[in-house]
Amino acid sequence: MPRLIGTLLRAAASLAIALFLTAASTQWSWAEVREPNGLWTGPMRGQTPTTLRGAIVIDLAGLEALMPKDPVLLDVGPADQKPEDFPKDRLWLPTHRSIPDAVWLPGAGTAALGATQEEAFFRRVEELTQGDSSKPIVTFCRPECWGSWNAGKRLVMKGFTSVYWFPGGINSWQEVHDTVEVKPDKAWHPEPAK
């Protein structure tokens, strides 16, 4: 009889723990991140919304389906920063890998672009789309990157009508496809970090 009572107590304790964990995981789950009214001005890395009003949010399958339409691929991921303690007698040779044919505009997704930089951003996009505001444009960087969200939002606010945001970014792409080394776009000169 004591053995049966012990077994029943352990089963009841296991059930109570399972119920508690289920309730706790529901209560403590990530809340939906809401879109800001304008550009995001907080940290560039962190949980992002699942939507971008005025744009189409796509996953890898969506990007693959869009590729035959020859979209403009805008990688706005940041450039690696040289560590302060990097040895002075060694070469600093960072590389940036991206989706083939992507145009890399490092830092173009920051909310704090100066007027000159914002003009340069739109001028470059205008060149890449050949003045066609309905040409598909895909913004991306890495997962949980507000920079790519901001770049898409900036395009939507400027009147571009075929903006796609690829939040999975390079990480999602390279799970299935090869990436290539890219250099910063020659027409893009980001302002120094402040």
Image (spheres, grey):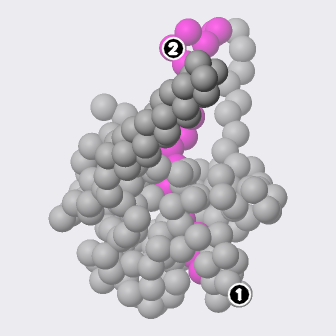
Residue 176 position within the rendered picture, expressed as x and y whole percent measured from the top left: 79, 62
Q: Residue at left 37%, top 69%?
A: 51
Residue 49 appears left or right of 129: left
Tell me the SS state at disc 1: helix
Position of residue 138 relative to residue 151, above or below, is: below
The residue identified by callout 2 is 84
Residue 128 position within the rendered picture, expressed as x and y whole percent measured from the top left: 53, 76
Q: Residue at left 73%, top 64%?
A: 100
State the separation of the CA atoms marked 1 and 2.
Answer: 43 Å
Q: Tag 2: residue type?
A: Glu
Question: Of callouts 1 and 2, which one flags the residue occurring earlier in the amino acid sequence?
Answer: 1
Q: Nearer the viewer, mark 1 or mark 2?
A: 1
Task: Check the picture and name the quadrant holding the C terminus.
Answer: top left
Residue 43 appears left or right of 132: left
The residue identified by callout 1 is 68
Tell me which corner region of the image, top left, top right, bottom left or bottom right, holds residue 162.
Answer: bottom left
Tell me the SS state at disc 2: loop
Of 147 and 103, the residue lying toward us: 147
Whether residue 67 is visible: yes
Residue 79 position within the rendered picture, expressed as x and y whole percent measured from the top left: 54, 40
Q: Residue at left 45%, top 58%?
A: 148
Magenta span has 83?
Answer: yes
Q: Tag 1: residue type?
A: Pro
Of 152 and 120, the residue lying toward us: 152
Q: Residue furthest front?
A: 1
Range drawn in magenta? 70-88
Q: Residue at left 40%, top 65%?
A: 50
Please state the total of marks drawn on the protein image: 2
Residue 138 position within the rendered picture, expressed as x and y whole percent measured from the top left: 53, 72
User: Most prominent secondary structure in the magenta stretch?
Assistant: loop
Whether residue 112 is visible: no
Q: Residues within 10 Å of mark 1 (few under 14, many from 20)?
A: few
